Image: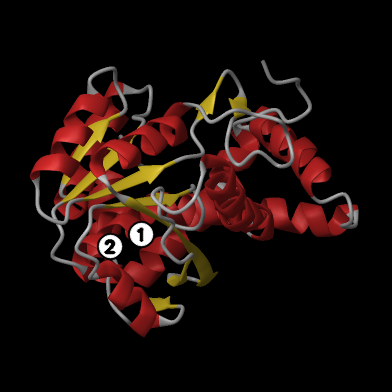
Amino acid sequence: MLSNPFLFTLLRLLPASFASWLGGWLSANIARKSMKLRDQRARDNLALLRPDLPEATREAILTRRWFNLGRTMAELANVDRLVNARHVTIANEAAYREALASPRPMIFLTTHIGNWDLLAAHLKASTDRPGLGVYDPPEDPAQAAMLKRARESYMGEAITGNSGAARAILRHLAEKDRAMLYILVDERRDRQVWFPRFGRDLEPSGNLSIALRLARRSDARFLPFTLARTKGAHFHLDWHPPLDPNEMDEVEMLKAMDGFLGKACIDHADQWLALHDMDLTAPTA
């Protein structure tokens, strides 16, 4: 969908809710059949994370995952039409707005649940803070170029997590008043996810490690949050009260992040992208 200009344009012309459904249907009924390895990998990981569920229930979760993946891709064409109270509700909205008004820099942490791009767009629309988004681009150049154009239209400035990203992010947080950073911390490397930890003894690495260092150097606070799909093209934003590196040590912060984001990945396994991009049966380095 990302690399097909005709389909992308068609999804833009259709009503947003119908375009979302069409993307989900194409993913569950066509794309899934050509991605059997990823489907099986998700099945194996889900069995480890939710051994309490009957096999039939886990299969239903996997089917909903493919619908969510297709919906999320299709919704890229219509993000601006979904950033409103009709499509997004907020847990304890008054307190959330108060947290956004903090005078200090803030780093917003999330995982690939529901529609993470809509979450970035909603964050930008909810505050006057200068924003910066960090993401890992797809390997396909055409998809990467289209995704970058789409994200910059609703995320503000967006950069990839390359070797120079940390310096650019630090300048952004240190030099801009009330700056904010939006970062996904469940990136996959070597067929593994390094956060959430799911009880594994893993040191912070990747985006999470960068976020911890940046927060200390810029006096920023963390705000973990998620945007889970409720029904169709409708979502609910849940969030954790801000975590302050000046008041908590690293062990406490990681426990709080794991408790919120890790639980969300399990509770919303039917919407978590990384489930089919990792192998939890393999040992970590």
Measure how far apart labels 2 and 1 are at the Cα level: 6 Å
Q: Is residue 101 above or below residue 58?
A: below
> Please, what secondary structure does the residue beneath circle 1 have?
helix
Residue plotted at (71% across, 30% down): 201
Give 248 or 47, whichever is nearer the viewer. 248
212 is higher (above) or lower (below) than 52: above
Q: Name the residue tied to disc 2.
A: 123
Residue 103 picture quarter: bottom left
Q: Residue 150: percent from the left, percent from the top?
A: 21, 46
Quadrant where the image shows the C terminus: top right
Q: In this view, does 112 lie to the left or right of 178?
A: right
User: In the displayed structure, does residue 171 sit left or right of residue 165?
Assistant: left
Residue 56 lies, with reference to residue 163, above or below; the image says below
- For the point 36% across and 31% down, which residue is it? 136
Q: How crowded is mark 1: few (under 14 residues within 10 Å), some or many (20 or more)?
A: many
Q: Which of 129 and 279 is in front in this view?
A: 129
Say what amino acid the circle numbered 2 marks: Leu
Q: Quadrant of residue 71?
A: bottom left
Outermost residue, front direction?
A: 247
Q: Dot 2 lies on which element?
A: helix
From the image, tell me which residue sits under label 1: 119
Residue 63 appears in the picture as rendered: yes
What residue type is disc 1 on? Leu
Estimate the x, y position of residue 91 in percent, counting from the top left: 46, 78
- Residue for point 22% across, 20% down: 164
Residue at x-position 65% and y-position 29%: 202
The answer to which image quadrant residue 234 occupies is bottom left
Task: Give neighbour class at mark 2: few <14, some 14-19, many 20+ (Cα, 10 Å).
Answer: many
Work out whether residue 178 or residue 195 is closer to the camera in this orientation and state it: 178
Q: Which of 164 and 175 is in front in this view?
A: 175
Say whether marks 2 and 1 touch (CB < 8 Å): yes
